[in-house]
Image (tube, helix red, strand yellow):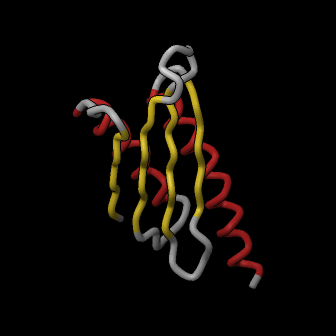
Amino acid sequence: MEIRIQAIHFDASEKLEKFIQKKVSKLEQYYDGIIAVEVSLKVVKPETAQNKEAGIKVLVPRNEDMFSCKVADTFEEAVDMAVEALVKQLLKAKEKMREK
């Protein structure tokens, strides 16, 4: 599974990238055959507290791509919430596959 990280209008630290790699790589245990995961990080309205946005897109074969976008105080928190939402989507998709 390939993980691509894109930081929009800022440079992501190595520590943040490692955190994202670790969190996102856990998605594989919920759904076999994930081709790639695209993570985009963006600072929205810099003057507010909840201004870190993490969007995660999961590319899966024979199924619709899955996407989750969350905003939080930190990128780590936003990534955590987005990964949790994607786990639910992946489990739901896996259940649908079993029913077919």
Q: Quadrant of residue 71?
A: top right
Viewer-side residue, 40 vs 24: 40
Q: Position of residue 73 (x, y in %)?
A: 53, 20
Position of residue 30 relative to residue 18, above or below, is below
Q: Position of residue 35 (x, y in %)?
A: 41, 70
In this image, 46 relative to 87: left or right? left
Report the residue at 55% width, 59% height from top.
30
Image quarter where the N terminus lies is: bottom left
Q: Position of residue 45 (x, y in %)?
A: 53, 24
Which residue extends farthest left?
Answer: 14
Report the residue at 45% width, 29% height from top.
43
Q: Position of residue 32 (x, y in %)?
A: 49, 70
Position of residue 20 relative to residue 65, above or below, is above
Position of residue 52 relative to residue 6, above or below, is above
In this image, 99 relative to 56: left or right? right
Report the residue at 46% width, 73% height from top.
33
Viewer-side residue, 28 vs 75: 75
Q: Quadrant of residue 100?
A: bottom right
In this image, 2 relative to 85: left or right? left
Report the residue at 55% width, 14% height from top.
49
Viewer-side residue, 55 vs 17: 55
